[in-house]
Image (cartoon, rainbow, N blue to C red):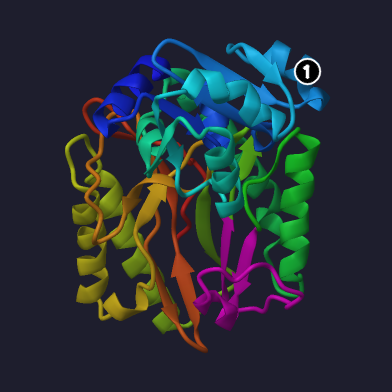
Amino acid sequence: MIDQALREAMQRAGVDALWISGPANVRAVSGFTHPKDGKVLVTGDAATLFTDSRYTVQAREESRLPQAIARPPETYELAAESVKGLRVGFEAEHLTVANLEDLRRHWPEATLVPLRGVMEGLRAVKTPQEIAAVQAAQDLADRAFAHVRPMIRAGVREWDVALAIEAFLRQEGAENAFDVIVASGPRGAMPHGSASMRVMQDGELVTVDMGARLNGYHSDMTRTVAIGTPSEEMRRVYNAVLEAEEAAVKAVKPGVRAADLDKLARDILTKHGLGEAFAHSLGHGVGLEVHEVPGLRGTSEDVLKPGMIITIEPGAYLPDVGGVRIEDLVLVTEDGYRVMSLSPKETV
């Protein structure tokens, strides 16, 4: 499926071939599970995975593409004949200046064309197999959160919660999708407050942002929970964020502009006097990378399509006081949405 779609995208971009170097894109095209050490050359009638001799057996077992086993500069030399006289697109966001100079030196008879977002746009819509893979990662993350929820209490360090999440995922054959965020009390005002040695206290809100990386695919979910009874102000903030999150989730369907979803959630928080406290975009796509197309921000031109997997994650952050973020992983279906993250959202 992606081969035909990719060639059509190449035609629209005005190139005869594409040199793929972004690891997630290499994996998407080839199936090779060590894509940081691989490249793919796609031409009008062929596609080849280039990797080195450490992966001869692995590439043969995993990839649906024929392989060329070599290290640079031999890699470029092997491909030179295939690209002679062609317009070759390269991924401008993934190719280093040094590697571009190598391509120019070894492919003097090719015209190199910088491209952005070709593969990323195709990867935005997931196959049924990919949807199942992301769901498996999210199911595992839900189990991990349920495992650590009893630990979130006064006297426990944020770091202990993060460590327990990582250990649980590792024992299940997965790993953290990103550094676990555990932000309690005033540290909740930091959207990316990675777990610290701080001891959680009674009366605080605690934000936990976590995901699993399983078989190459990611999940992403945030829950904010209470230890004891938080202040009236933080309860107000929590319920405002929850209102914005649930409204945005319910608005998900094909044809909706990502920017409109961001505005919907932002307007609700503004109504509660928290518009300026919403310090980031509403969400993003998730798949082989934890941040993918589409981008759910006010300036986005992306439109939702069936098969996209997105996050909905409004937040409000009050410096020196605390913060709240609530995030669900959501599949865009043919006629609406399906929430993939099933961890309960608690009443505060």
Side of 163 relative to 318 (left or right): right
Task: Give the image location of residue 144, x and y in percent.
Answer: 67, 44
Whether residue 68 is visible to the viewer of this picture, yes or no, is: yes
- Given the current orientation, which residue lies at the most extreme front position? 109
At a point 74% along the width and 77% down the height, the residue shown is 199
Whether residue 33 is visible to the viewer of this picture, yes or no, is: no
Side of 145 relative to 238 (left or right): right
In the picture, the quarter occupied by the N terminus is: top left
- Against 109, is 234 above or below? below
Residue 191 drawn in magenta: yes
- Against 154, is 72 above or below? above
Q: State the residue in front, 92 or 289.
A: 92
Task: Give the image location of residue 42, x and y in percent.
Answer: 47, 21
At a point 69% along the width and 56% down the height, the residue shown is 150
Q: Which residues are magenta?
A: 180-209
- Given the current orientation, which residue lies at the most extreme bottom position? 320
- Against 159, is 86 above or below? above
Task: Give the image location of residue 324, x and y in percent.
Answer: 46, 69
At a point 62% along the width and 33% down the height, the residue shown is 216
Side of 19 relative to 11 (left or right): right
Residue 295 drawn in magenta: no
Q: State the residue in front, 249 or 99.
A: 99
Task: Name the residue beneath numbered marker 1.
Answer: 56
- Circle count: 1
**Circle 1: element type:** helix
Q: State the residue in front, 99 or 202.
A: 99
At a point 65% along the width and 58% down the height, the residue shown is 180
Side of 9 relative to 228 (left or right): left
Kind of residue indicated by mark 1: Thr
